[in-house]
């Protein structure tokens, strides 16, 4: 049986360790994945946000170019059909030459999508040309180039191209949107210094200029530390995992405790049965021998009475034994009445009178002069105090045994102390002696009989009276059983 329990405990330990380890490993891998995705998504969102913001600036620059084209004081747009195909050809030139000593630049081009043949510029034709030229400029800007179709217009576009800078407010909005698309909900700061970057995640740097980066044209973001982000986002998952691990460990602990208690209970039960068998066998054997003697021999009246007294004594002993066992068993499930008014002083005096005391024992009873009444059950409380008193007598092997009853009243209730000068009880056994069937181990010596029921019965009775019982050392020798009971229960 012992080997089976050990095997079961080892297997259960392996299972619990395995489950706990897998759960912790899964949380660790999940942590690594979340942190890695956070960093990757934050950098990717920055790149996309920069591209979107730059695209918006390019579109705004194209609109500015279109306004310049529509302004007749800046650019002159004409058209004619004086070519071999007689298709509409558009001419664009600066109104004011960029270089004063030179002629104004001009450029002529056709638009394949414009099918109308007009020899003079019209609003429709001009709009078509401006839109077409806007697409040309847009393609140039996408390639980060500026073509000087005319000197004046080219310089205007180049200056606007170089002076274009990122709009921080607009970029914040775009970057927030890109982070939200990746399910990252955290605050951030742009272009922070080294002091502000402490304990934060910093993205890589992205160029916000249309060409190679000029001075102060890169941008980066400082976000929440990935570890803090993981704890904040995954806290409920982590709490659930830790809760499951805790429940598993508690169940494992409870299971082990139950198995060990069961194993211990079996050992205690076997010892109890052994003691009970011996205690029952002795009076039964005595009754059997005495009865057979009465049957077989013609005894005189005086001898018969002696034999009958032996039978009566042993029968009473068996009855007391059965009553003690039944009282302890009934106490588990049966509620006894607790409505009697008990004078504790009087109850203790009755217990002392009813107990057979050895001649060499000294017994003192110290109490207050006033009557001390509590609510409870006289029979069970008397039996409990009797049990402690009998133990103090039974286990006291000193030459001059003494027992003292001391009662003290306080605001918290009544304290009844039963003090002896016996061998005392070791600290390791002070709580165990109240367990059912438990007896302090004495090796192979069994000179004092008992069943391990008395003090467990006492503990239950005192608890039913809403009181408590503790054991302390009576220095230099002996024990003090201290019972605390509430006044008027």
Image (cartoon, helix red, strand yellow):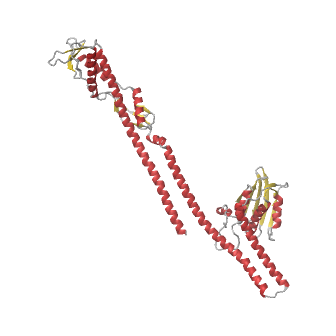
Q: Is residue 469 above or below residue 207?
A: below
In-image side of 352 versus 105 (left or right): right
Name the quarter where the N terminus is drawn. bottom right
Q: Is residue 396 above or below residue 155?
A: below
* Residue farthest left in this picture: 84
Residue at 76% from the left image edge and 84% from the top image edge: 292
Quadrant of res 301? bottom right
Q: Is residue 288 visible?
A: yes
Residue at 59% from the left image edge and 61% from the top image edge: 258
Quadrant of res 198? top left
Q: Is residue 117 above or below residue 489?
A: above
In-image side of 223 versus 373 (left or right): left
**333 or 375, which lies in front?**
333
Quadrant of res 166? top left
Q: Is residue 475 visible?
A: no
* Residue farthest front in this picture: 116
Q: Position of residue 163 (x, y in %)?
A: 32, 22
Q: Position of residue 125 (x, y in %)?
A: 26, 16
In-image side of 14 versus 351 (left or right): left
Residue at 82% from the left image edge and 67% from the top image edge: 354
Q: Position of residue 355 (x, y in %)?
A: 80, 67
Q: Position of residue 73 (x, y in %)?
A: 28, 11
Question: How many numbered marks appear?
Answer: 0
């Amino acid at each position: 049986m012992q080997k089976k329990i050990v095997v079961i405990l080892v297997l259960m330990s392996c299972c619990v360790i395995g489950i706990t380890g897998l759960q912790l490993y899964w949380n660790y891998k999940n942590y690594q994945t979340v942190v890695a995705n956070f960093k990757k998504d934050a950098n990717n969102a920055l790149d996309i946000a920069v591209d979107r913001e730059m695209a918006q600036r390019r579109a705004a620059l194209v609109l500015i170019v279109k306004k310049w084209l529509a302004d007749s004081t800046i650019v002159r747009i004409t058209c004619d059909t004086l070519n071999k195909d007689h298709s509409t050809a558009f001419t664009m030139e600066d109104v004011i030459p960029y270089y004063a000593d030179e002629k104004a630049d001009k450029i002529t081009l056709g638009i394949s999508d414009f099918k109308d043949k007009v020899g003079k510029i019209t609003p429709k034709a001009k709009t078509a040309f401006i839109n077409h030229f806007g697409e040309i400029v847009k393609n140039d800007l996408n390639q980060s180039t500026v073509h000087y179709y005319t000197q004046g217009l080219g310089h205007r576009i180049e200056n606007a191209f170089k002076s274009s800078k990122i709009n921080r407010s607009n970029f914040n909005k775009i970057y927030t949107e890109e982070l939200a698309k990746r399910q990252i909900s955290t605050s951030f700061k742009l272009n922070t210094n080294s002091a502000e970057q402490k304990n934060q995640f910093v993205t890589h740097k992205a160029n916000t200029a249309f060409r190679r980066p000029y001075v102060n044209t890169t941008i980066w973001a400082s976000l929440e530390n990935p570890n803090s982000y993981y704890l904040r986002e995954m806290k409920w998952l982590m709490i659930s995992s830790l809760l499951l691990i805790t429940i598993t460990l508690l169940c494992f602990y409870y299971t082990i405790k139950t198995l060990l208690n069961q194993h211990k209970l079996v050992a205690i039960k076997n010892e109890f049965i052994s003691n009970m068998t011996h205690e029952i066998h002795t009076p039964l054997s005595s009754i059997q021998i005495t009865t057979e003697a009465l049957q077989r021999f013609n005894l005189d009246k005086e001898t018969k009475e002696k034999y009958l007294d032996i039978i009566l004594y042993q029968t009473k002993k068996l009855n007391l034994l059965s009553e003690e066992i039944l009282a302890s068993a009934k106490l588990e499930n049966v509620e006894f009445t607790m409505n009697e008014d008990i004078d504790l002083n009087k109850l203790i005096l009755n217990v002392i009178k009813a107990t057979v005391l050895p001649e060499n024992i000294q017994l003192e009873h110290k109490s207050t002069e006033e009557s001390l009444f509590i609510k409870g059950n006289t029979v069970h409380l008397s039996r409990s105090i009797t049990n402690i008193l009998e133990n103090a007598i039974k286990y006291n092997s000193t030459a001059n045994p003494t027992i003292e009853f001391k009662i003290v009243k306080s605001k918290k209730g009544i304290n009844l102390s039963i003090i002896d000068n016996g061998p005392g009880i070791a600290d390791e056994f002070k709580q165990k002696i109240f367990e059912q069937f438990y007896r302090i181990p004495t090796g192979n010596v069994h000179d004092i009989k008992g069943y391990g029921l008395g003090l467990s019965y006492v503990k239950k009775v005192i608890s039913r009276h809403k009181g408590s019982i503790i054991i302390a050392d009576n220095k230099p020798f002996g024990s003090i059983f201290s019972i605390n009971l509430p006044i008027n229960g």
